[in-house]
Image (cartoon, grey):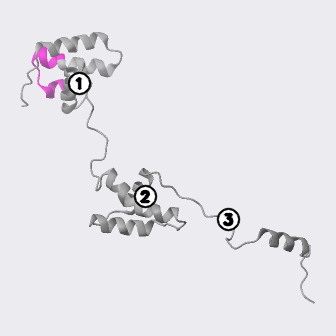
């Protein structure tokens, strides 16, 4: 048997107010669950069967009603398992940024190897891609022409080349 929740009169009044002003079925269920526990003294197991939600949802509903007027940032989201802070990541990428701005060609494997060496443990390649994306790095396609090409020489070749190729006789 689950333990009995102690719900104060203020919470019951807030739940009644929420029940009366509810615009959706979810709000109504939250308010009803708190009222049933507080007024009738039912256990959370019994109350969870009435609206068809889990026991944990009943307690979350109670917390939502209790903190109804308080704007609390929920702890969801963010970087929970980061290996480096954003500042450390910027310092790490600064060396590679200098190489890229000097005209060097960068590929991800050497950056990934340096990241693994810096962290001291193996990380997936996707971590490196996410790191680069987080700091605004993107893939730039190489130019479609050879660096030693001469457009004037190519135009001259086009003008003087035969229109139709014939095999040698």
On screen, residue 143 versus residue 129, left or right, reads right
Q: Which residue is mark 3?
A: 144
On screen, residue 46 versus residue 17, left or right, reads left
Decide: marks 3, 1 in contact (CB < 8 A)?
no
* Spatial CA span between label 2 and label 3: 25 Å
Pick the front one: 15 or 86: 86
* Spatial CA span between label 3 and label 1: 59 Å
- Mark 2, Cα crowd under 10 Å, few <14 / some 14-19 / many 20+, is some
Q: Is residue 167 above or below residue 134?
A: below
Q: Which residue is mark 2?
A: 129
Residue 12 within the segment the image draws in magenta: no
Residue 39 within the segment the image draws in magenta: yes
Counting residues from the start of the chain, the first of labels 2 and 3 encountered is 2
Secondary structure, magenta segment, majority class: helix
Question: Which type of secondary structure does the marked residue at label 2 adopt?
Answer: helix
Counting residues from the start of the chain, the first of labels 2 and 1 encountered is 1
Q: Residue at x 48, y 55 (%)?
A: 137
Question: Which type of secondary structure does the marked residue at label 1 adopt?
Answer: helix
Span highlighted in magenta in the image: 35-50
Residue 82 position in % (x across, y down): 29, 52
């Amino acid at each position: 048997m689950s333990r009995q929740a102690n719900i104060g009169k203020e919470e019951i009044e807030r739940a009644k107010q929420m029940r009366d002003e509810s615009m959706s079925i979810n709000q109504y269920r939250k308010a009803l669950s708190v009222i049933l526990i507080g007024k009738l003294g039912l256990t959370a197991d019994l109350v969870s069967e009435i609206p068809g939600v889990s026991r944990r949802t009943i307690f979350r509903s109670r917390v939502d009603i209790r903190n109804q007027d308080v704007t609390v940032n929920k702890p969801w989201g963010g970087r929970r398992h980061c290996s480096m802070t954003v500042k450390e990541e910027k310092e790490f990428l600064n060396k590679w940024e200098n190489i890229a701005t000097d005209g060097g060609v960068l590929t991800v494997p050497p950056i990934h190897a340096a990241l693994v060496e810096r962290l001291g443990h193996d990380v997936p390649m996707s971590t490196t891609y996410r790191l680069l994306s987080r700091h605004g790095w993107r893939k730039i396609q190489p130019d479609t022409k050879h660096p030693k090409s001469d457009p004037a020489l190519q135009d001259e070749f086009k003008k003087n080349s035969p229109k139709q190729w014939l095999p040698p006789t």
